[in-house]
Amino acid sequence: MMLRVSHSLSVSELALYFLRLGIIGFGGPPAHIALMRTDLVEKRCWLTSEQFATDLTTANLLPGPTSTEMAIYIGYRMRGPLGALISGWCFILPAALLVGLLAWAYVTWGGLSWMQHLLYGVKPVAFALVLHGLLQMVRTTPWTPPHAVILLTAFALLQWTAIDVLLIFLLAGMAALPSLRKTTPATLFISATTITSTSIVAAPLLSVLWEFLKIGTVIYGGGFALIGVLQQTIVIRLGWLTQQQLLDAIAVGQSTPGPVFTTATFIGYLVGGASGAALATIGIFAPAFVFVLAENLLLSRLKQAPQMRRFLQGVNIAVIASLVHAAIALGSSALIDPIALLLCAAAFGALWWKKIDAHWLVGVGVLVGLSRLAIF
């Protein structure tokens, strides 16, 4: 059913609210969504509980960043397509600007010894975030024997081939459909090794836009799912970043307010400066706007289709495989000595049992790095 658009709220009110949320919204998508519900359902009464729940269910089924898509949905409810654009980009821009500034500082001073000491304490915390996200996804995923086969096949393809990870996601989703299960994993392996992923030969900046558009179009599973895709695409296939640089990008994305997908902004800056940062940000977030508007106008019944749910379950399994693969590779860069290993274990324990927000843990990592700088 198409959303009813209310014009009782001004565009400036939408813009101010989501700018504020983009500035203070630490803690990732769960915290963002909780804040939106408290503010907009309970305090401001912009939406009813039923409307909020409906939008959240749909956002969870769409590829892309869930909390950003919620901001877009809310904007559409209030002011139509213009409201969707205003609310979405006002939520994104504060984080993108902050991450871009941090990327500039990283590039400017990253080669100095004090920056390396600082990052020494941040990398184990970033690795703990990866492990925590992986285990959360494993714990909340329904497992069946076909899913286990898809997981092992996807991991094998990631480990021993150079196939585009986005293609593996697509094939994993197809393999989860009942009509195709009898051919899994053979279909997944043969298809992946015979189909070539789309690529372009262009200037580096256009390549940045293209790669992040592809990622934003098919990424499913939230901010942690992004890590496996970045490791496979940006580090292994394209060679734009090292493992250490990806860990640093993850740490920045997790410790700043706003959408964690602004990790792409950091990477874009490292690859192509300010223009690269802008194009990477546009590329990874633009599909979310398209999906929300298309779902509302054309695909409102798609979320009810059992086949779509099964397809997305298959994609989610492949996302877990990519995250396992990324964790194996990133561990060697983060856990370089017993102190780093101890810091990682402590950060993981704080995440798992104490539910401490990521930005506080990254702050502890910074203090450890500064202490190391003082000693050495």
Image (cartoon, rainbow, N blue to C red):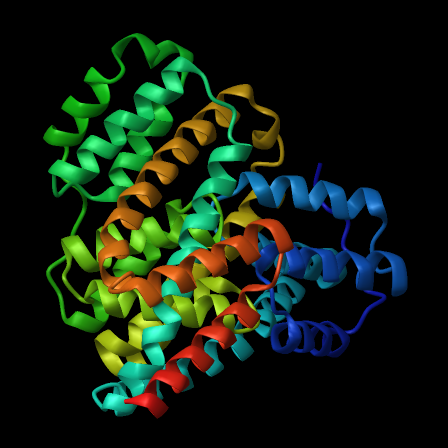
Q: Is residue 6 visible?
A: no
Residue at image location 32% in from the left, 75% down from the top: 120
Residue at image location 56% in from the left, 58% down from the top: 350
Does 10 appear above or below 228?
below
Q: Nearer the viewer, residue 9 or 23?
A: 23
Q: Nearer the viewer, residue 178 or 345?
A: 345
Q: Is residue 218 visible?
A: yes
Residue at image location 26% in from the left, 85% down from the top: 110
Q: Where residue 359 sits: x, y (%)?
A: 54, 70
Q: Where residue 334 sits: x, y (%)?
A: 29, 63
Does 123 appear above or below 372?
above
Quarter of the image where one finds residue 160: top left
Q: Where residue 345 sits: x, y (%)?
A: 43, 56
Q: Nearer the viewer, residue 236 or 80?
A: 236
Please give left or right for residue 304 compared with residue 104 in the image.
right
Please give left or right for residue 20 compared with residue 185 in the image.
right
Q: Nearer the viewer, residue 246 or 39?
A: 246
Please give left or right for residue 2 compared with residue 146 in the image.
right
The quarter of the image holding the C terminus is bottom left
Quarter of the image where one finds residue 86: bottom right
The quarter of the image holding the N terminus is top right
Furthest toward the top, the residue is 182
Residue at image location 39% in from the left, 72% down from the top: 122
Q: Where residue 273 sits: x, y (%)?
A: 27, 82
Does 184 appear above or below 302?
above
Does 58 appear above or below 262?
above
